[in-house]
Image (spheres, rainbow, N blue to C red):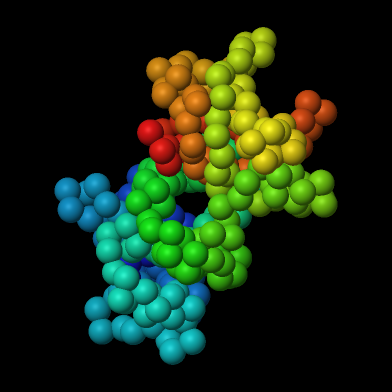
């Protein structure tokens, strides 16, 4: 059984990095597989730099465990990047949208756009076309999806937003242009029209409160083909994904 990034703990899905941050506060024999609910073990990894969950000694996953099935289907393609991707359980976007406390929102953003998302994106960039087409991953709400189904072009994202779906996490794939200052904020428009094939405008948006943190990285992602991990939105100004951390939300596909 592969290691996985999330576990069920007291009726919540929790990420291994969350456990690692507050290691002493958790009951270490209370973690369960998110799918089949067997007991699993938390491991902090080598030098405490790679937290994850793995099989509890002498306890196997149940025959109908979907996480186990996904792992078995990739045995012939096993590589570090493949394992990183299939061990990732995608989070629900409504965890952020339904929160009102500033501290809880900050914690949720850390869960979404932290070390886990950075590793996932870096592994994604290294996958072959065949792996992207065929690898499956599991979502937090127990859906199995192909990797290529969560990689979306901006027109597809816009169509989904226009159809009323405002709570989804996706990976935008597209070409960025030069950044533009909008008051105290910064936006990075995606290409559209002509040879680019995108019919609608779409922006990556860095709020003023996150400019300083990202300032030295903005130019590095302009005029690039990128993957962007985030939660798309529609407002009175158009369509966008907010960037809180370029390091954890963006991977360059072509340098």
Q: Residue furthest front?
A: 195
Give the image location of residue 151, x and y in percent.
56, 52
Q: Quadrant of the N terminus?
A: bottom left
Q: Nearer the viewer, residue 140 or 239?
A: 239
Give the side of residue 244 with respect to residue 157, left or right. left
What residue sits 40% from the left and 17% below the top? 216
Q: Is residue 131 above or below residue 51?
A: below
Q: Nearer the viewer, residue 37 or 90?
A: 90
Q: Residue furthest bottom?
A: 63
Give the image location of residue 75, x and y in percent.
31, 76
Q: Is residue 181 above or below residue 25?
A: above
Q: Is residue 123 above or below residue 207?
A: below
Give the side of residue 100 with respect to residue 246, left or right. right
What residue sits 38% from the left and 58% below the top? 128
Residue 63 in view in this figure: yes
Q: Quadrant of the C terminus?
A: top left
Give the image location of residue 19, x and y in percent.
37, 53
What residue sits 56% from the left and 67% below the top? 145
Count of numbered circles on the image: 0
């Amino acid at each position: 059984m592969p290691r996985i990034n999330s576990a069920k703990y007291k009726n919540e899905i929790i990420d291994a990095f969350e456990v690692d941050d507050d290691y002493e506060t958790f009951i270490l024999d209370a973690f369960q597989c998110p799918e089949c609910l067997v007991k699993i073990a938390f491991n902090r990894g080598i030098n405490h730099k790679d937290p994850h969950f793995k099989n509890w000694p002498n306890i196997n996953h149940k025959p109908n465990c979907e996480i186990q099935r996904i792992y078995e289907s990739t045995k012939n393609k096993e590589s570090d990047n493949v394992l990183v991707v299939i061990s990732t359980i995608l989070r629900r976007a409504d965890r952020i949208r339904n929160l009102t406390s500033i501290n809880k929102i900050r914690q949720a953003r850390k869960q979404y756009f932290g070390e886990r998302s950075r590793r996932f994106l870096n592994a994604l960039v290294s996958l072959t076309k065949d792996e992207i087409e065929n690898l499956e991953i599991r979502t937090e709400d127990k859906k199995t999806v192909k990797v290529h189904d969560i990689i979306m072009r901006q027109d597809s994202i816009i169509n989904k937003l226009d159809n009323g779906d405002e709570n989804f996490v996706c990976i935008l794939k597209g070409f960025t242009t030069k950044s533009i200052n909008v008051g105290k904020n910064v936006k990075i428009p995606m290409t559209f029209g002509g040879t680019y094939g995108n019919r609608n405008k779409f922006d990556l948006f860095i709020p003023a409160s996150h400019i300083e943190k990202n300032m030295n990285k903005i130019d590095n992602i302009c005029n690039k083909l990128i993957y962007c991990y985030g939660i798309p939105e529609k407002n009175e100004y158009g369509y966008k994904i907010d960037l809180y951390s370029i390091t954890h939300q963006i991977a360059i596909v072509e340098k």
